[in-house]
Amino acid sequence: MNKIVDPAIPRHVAIIMDGNGRWALGRGLGRIFGHRKGVEAVRRTVDAARESGISYLTLFAFSSENWKRPPDEVDGIMELISSFIHRELDNYHRQNMRFQVIGERSGLGPKVLNALEVAEERTRNNTGLHVIVAVNYGARGEIAGALRALARQVAEGKLDPADIDEAAISGNLDTAGLPDPDLVIRTSGEQRLSNFLLWQMAYSELVFLPCNWPDFNRELFFEALSEYARRNRRFGALAEPQVALTDT
């Protein structure tokens, strides 16, 4: 069956969920309370993403630099990640959603690692919204790991150095097989990438929002999509009118 591919709707949206701690501190609360409220924003965002018709949603849940935070906060975030998955997995599985994890798994504790791997395995064959969760993730480390993998292939005689191109590097990243994000949203008013999907964001549209993550909602998600629709993505070429295409 034919379907209409609308270039005004991003295929892949990635979100840097920033501002949980500031949201809480601004209310005289502990930082972990802000992370708990941030989980509610995740639920709203996943629902809005399904409603919007996008195919991929990547959420930056915990960076490789976040280990520098106080141990109590780190432990609390890990507990929130695992408990969120346990509570929501059945419902999301019924909705045909697929979960995937990117990041360095060896640094994660057994409880959160088990929750993430169970979610991946159970939803592996689902064909609805594909949710990618970045946990213990850092883009520079990801790129370094891809280069090490390519170096091993060269040393083993499986790869000619002359054949190392952009596709070879992309194929050895955590996101291999996934489309690059069309739209990247960051909350909290900060305007930086914070070591997130640096290779994949080469041509992403960026939207920075002043709200902290716990205040992010369906309306703000769709406002970001509307801003994306107003952009003219040229990828280095001359501007051309955007039209709907038929994909057979």
Image (spheres, helix red, strand yellow):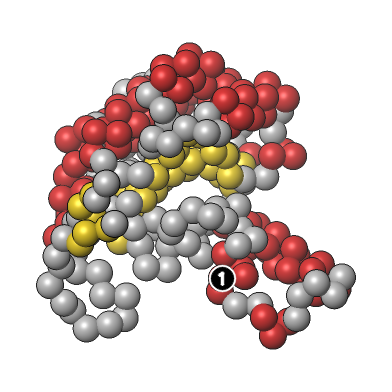
Relative to 40, 70 lies left or right: right
Residue beneath the point at 62% across and 70% down: 168
Q: In this view, does 138 lie above or below 156?
A: above
Please name whichever residue, 192 or 200, is drawn nearer the observer in this view of the structure: 200
Amino acid on which disc 1 is placed: Ala
- The structure residue drawn at horizontal position 61% and vertical position 68%, both measured from the top left corner, is 169
The location of residue 173, given as percent across then percent down, is 61, 58
Q: Quarter of the image for the C terminus: give it.
A: bottom left
Residue 139: image location, x then y, percent:
57, 57
Please identify the quarter of the rendering in which residue 163 is found. bottom right
Q: Give the answer, above or below, for where 59 lies relative to 112.
A: below
Q: Which residue lies furthest to the front in this view?
A: 1
User: Which residue was labeled with disc 1?
Assistant: 167
Res. 165 image quadrant: bottom right
Q: Compare residues 9 and 67 and report the one nearer the observer.
A: 9
Q: Which residue is drawn at 52% across and 33% down?
A: 125
Q: Quadrant of residue 192?
A: bottom left
Where is residue 124? Give x, y as percent: 55, 34
Where is 141 relative to 166, above or below?
Answer: above
Left or right, 109 with reference to 47: right
Please give the name of the residue rendered at 19% of the width and 69% of the height, measured from the top-left corner: 232
Q: Can residue 38 be seen in this view?
A: no
Residue, far right: 156
